[in-house]
Image (tube, rainbow, N blue to C red):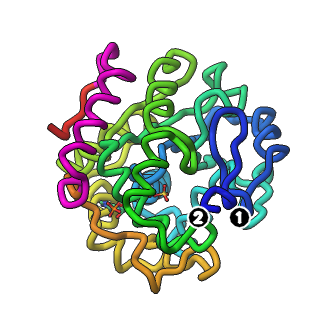
Amino acid sequence: ALNAFIFKYKGTYFLKDLTSPEFVDAIEHMEVRENDVFLVTYPKSGTVWTQQVLSLILNEGHRNGTENIDNLERAPWIEYNIRNYDYNSRPSPRLFSSHLPYYLMPKDLKFRMGKVIYVCRNPKDAMVSFYHFYKVFPKLNYSIDWETFVDLYMSGRVISGSWFDHVRGWYTHKEDFNILFITFEEMKKDLRAAVLKICKFLNVNLDEKAIDTVVEKATFKNMKHDPLANYTFFPRDILDQSKGDFLRKGTVGDWKNLLTVAQSEKIDQMFKENLGDLPVRFLWD
Ligand code: PPS
């Protein structure tokens, strides 16, 4: 019954009510502009945080005007067009979000048009955050228990499929894209350095003061109270925040409170098997 809310298509899983196979197929032909920015993540890896960072950077810390619109409008999901935006009529530079695997992205991107920022988070922390998300997402299931979720997550039967496939896919196809990899953990460790890294990648020159503004407006504490950034603007049928906040803890290592030793070791083993041959290292150890 759990997976009555999601459907499998082309090797991954989508939310039933919010998209369709036809819609996903059409993305392939989406026209990409040279200055488009695509923020891509596996779910619960820092998407909304990076939406905030990117929209602040592209708008000089808001001086250029996005202070009145919420994160979803600033960086809509390409595969979940929740508000039926006409993407083609959006002014440049366009910012989009996506949880898609590399092979379902607009084909233009493969010719290195547009830029991709891929944010990655420790699979254990993403797992814990995802579990809490299932509880506030009425379209999924309120009452899922941890054991059931662990089972679904480890076998990749959750929205966007397996963390390991997602990360491996993007990493091993990075030559096809104009892409910057960044981690939740490095943003957490030094947000200012992460902002500078993103600015450099986007060829955006901000003065010190604008950088300060971006960093300040993107801290967990400020976002938590920013009604345009904290996702409280979602209607209750999409996010029921009487069951918990979307901006929940925003920490590194919360997995230690929930995963058993056996579950943690299983993820370590899966990491080794799926990504062990790649020079990918994260900050979480
Ligand atoms: S989603 O549903 O896929 O778009 O979720 P996503 O935004 O990728 O991930 C949600 C987690 O990111 C945390 N978050 C932050 N952490 C630190 N600082 C800031 N500013 C911030 N904004 C969002 C959010 O709290 C979720 O993590 P958890 O661990 O559940 O708190």
Element type at mark 2: helix
Pointer 2 residue: 72
Mark in the foreground, 1 or 2 = 1
Callout 2 amino acid: Leu
Q: Give the range drawn in magenta.
A: 255-280
Q: What residue do we see at 29% from left, 17% from top? A: 279
Q: What residue do we see at 45% from left, 70% from top? A: 229
Q: Is residue 277 magenta?
A: yes
Q: Is residue 65 left or right of residue 130?
A: right
Question: Marks 1 and 2: CB-CB under 8 Å?
Answer: yes
Q: Give the alpha-carbon distance from disc 1 to disc 2, as whole Å.
A: 9 Å
Q: In this view, does 52 lie to the left or right of 34?
A: left
Callout 1 amino acid: Ile
Q: Is residue 210 above or below residue 107?
A: below
Q: What residue do we see at 35% from left, 48% from top? A: 206
Q: Is residue 47 magenta?
A: no
Pointer 1 residue: 82
